[in-house]
Image (spheres, coloured by chain):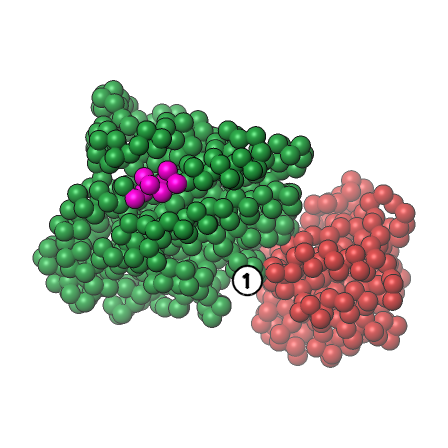
Amino acid sequence: MEATALDIIQVAESKSLTYQQKIFNMANTAERLVSPVEVLGYTDEEILYIHNHMICDLNEGYALYRPRYIVPDYRMFIKNGCRFLDLKSPRSLDELLDGLLILYHHVPSITSFPVYIGDLDKLINPFIDSEEEAYIKIKRFLNHIDKTIVDSFCHANIGPEKTKAGELILKAVIELENPTPNMTFKYNEEVDTDFFHKAIEACLRVSKPSFSNDNAYIKDVGEHAIVSCYNALPLGGGAYTLLRLRLGTIARRTQNLDEFINQLLPKVSKAMLSMIDKRINYLVEKSHFFETSFLVDEGFIQRDNFTAMFGMVGLAEAVNHILKCENLEERFGNSSRGDEIGHIIMQTLDKIVGEHKGQYVERTNNRYLLHAQVGANLDDEDNLNTPAHRIPVGDEPILPVHLKQAAQFHKYFPSGTGDLFAFDQTNINSLEAMGDIIKGSFNIGFRYITTYLQNSDLIRVTGYLIKRSEAEKVGRDEVVLRDTAIMGFGTNKNAKVFNRKIRKDGE
Amino acid sequence: MGNSLFINQIIPFSNVDGNGNRCAIFLQGCNLSCVYCHNPETISKDFNSLKVKEYSVEQLIDQIKEYIPFIRGITVSGGEPTLQDKGITELFLGIKPLGLSCYVDTNGYFSIKDKKELVDITDKFLFDVKTVDDSLKLCNNIKATSLETLDELLALNKIEEVRTVIINSYMDAKKTVETVAKRLVRYPDVTYKIIKVHKLGLRKEQIKEIKDFIPSDEDVLALVQKCKDIGLKKVKYVL
């Protein structure tokens, strides 16, 4: 959405933003002050869909100067050090951790903070000598990240192999109880049971790590990392840009499934594909990012490892609208006709996106990747579009039914989707049982799953972590450290994520 | 074949009825009436009550199949499930080929030779030892002890966990715990869980009966320590 000069004044005069948040917002405003028609060549139709909220561009900006998500291969730092930053290849744990912290400062993204900080256990493990000392350093390193990368889309990966480093990281995240970094445990069937259980315990206590279906993502994306909320993107590459369809908003403009599927949805989708094309072209050809970034020059990333995401939200609302049009009293999540409609919608999108030859996305077969998006709070329409393909909070069926209903849609989203489930305190005593649920979910097609305890302060919003207490401060207009707390407050207002159903006894 | 089961409740996912995630099925009817029973509504053998639902074994299997990707087995509890042993045996026969383990949660007041088919097909029992003395006062049941049944099941390697609820005066807690612990030493894979009596789920009359007989945490922990001193490796407790 375009910005105006008034936005600049509002940022300057805001009483509830930190200095860093003001800088970021000023820069973002500037990016959106220019006309997308002039700079990117958006057509009137394309602009219309942004103005009528059918397409959400997440305020990404029109004078693009860096890719949305960058996924550096930090192993290059261990191998070669970093010439640009005058850092030698690390020879000790101190040099590694210090070097990584320095590097992180120089990894751009849409949030201005790195969205991927490495497969930490694999990077760290070869440098461990004394376990006790390593633990203190790892804990300090993680806390440093939380206090300087003040955005919990910053994401670390661990697993699937068990390592001493992985175990120390899990121990530290439980003790620190920090929202950042976000974390994923890459799961496969060979994982060490004890390591898996430690990860589950951490997930229950501090809402991380979440679990990704490693083999499923390797199949669809190749060598990858889990970044930002739960995106699976090529390692040593990333994603140029992302736009998303508000399916609920689009569906509400139609009277029946046929009109939606065969007329309006393809129209809006093609417009969105065209905008993604234009954005990538500008980024690659006009912004010179890939010619000037040391990350490219030194092999941390390569231009031809980048892809782009075709996102969506609000499948539930689109389906519920169509069900109403068909005079059915059912709702998405508890309706087999609803599931059927959901599949028709996703298959339509799959086809449209699959047939479009994308710009500069050789790495993913010249195609953009479908992505199921987390919540946002940029517009009133975000109230009316549940994240991804999730069942709206309040409509959730009992857990086994919910898991199976959700699993059937995961296959459509090679670059990421995820579901989250709140459990109560007693589950801490039975990590085996949680393991059964997680394993079972992956066996029926889940790509990504996370759980948390409903009564912890640290809660997972729609794909990132916040402290409930911090979000409450936002509610009182107080300044908070992390911009994701501000997002989380808004998303709770829209999607009531603080009040997800607690899954006791499989309810 | 063609048995029915009379069921009070089905819990799709339980993590306290045997290891892992299990579907727990609570059958109606018990041969005891323990003073501290925390699901007293399952005691009555009146199957016509509104709360009780009759399922054919086939219906039950269909419902359990819904939970299959996520559970490692099923556990029948109650009440005292062995009272409906024919139905359970048929249920287990249908469930096992699906790759699920079949557990029974029992008070042990049954004779193995009378329930041979059930015992054969059950993978593991979760066994409540209420008391090793006369159980009239505690459970309103004259039969002496369940120890013989416990011994036989242990010898068949069919016990996963033994539990004892600790309450003052109604039982000799020390004697019960020691007696059981001495047996379990020979079976190091079996867990002994010692549970302090609590008031959750109890009716008003029950609370009145037991409120003056709740042991202290220290007393319960002392019993746990006793088990460890006797040589048990797998002891758990709930305070």
Q: Is residue A192 magenta?
A: no
Residue holding disc 1: A443
Q: Is residue A272 magenta?
A: yes
Q: Residues within 10 Å of mark 1 (few under 14, many from 20)?
A: some
> Which residue occupies the foreground of this view, A284 or A131?
A284
Q: Residue at x 24, y 36 (%)?
A: A40
Q: Amino acid at mark 1?
A: Asn
> Which residue occupies the foreground of this view, B45 or B117?
B117
Q: Is residue B207 above or below residue B111?
A: above
Quadrant of residue A166 within the rendered picture: bottom left
Chain painted red: B
Chain painted green: A
Quadrant of residue A278 within the rendered picture: top left
User: Could you say where residue B156 lies in the image, as x and y percent from the top left?
Assistant: 74, 79
Q: Residue at x 84, y 52 (%)?
A: B54
> Which residue occupies the foreground of this view, A392 or B237?
A392
Q: Is residue A299 above or below residue A311?
A: below
A59 left or right, relative to B103: left
What secondary structure is marked by label 1?
helix
Q: Residue at x 36, y 63 (%)?
A: A222
* First to last magenta residue range: A270-277
> Which residue occupies the foreground of this view, B214 or A414?
A414
Prevailing secondary structure of the magenta residues? helix
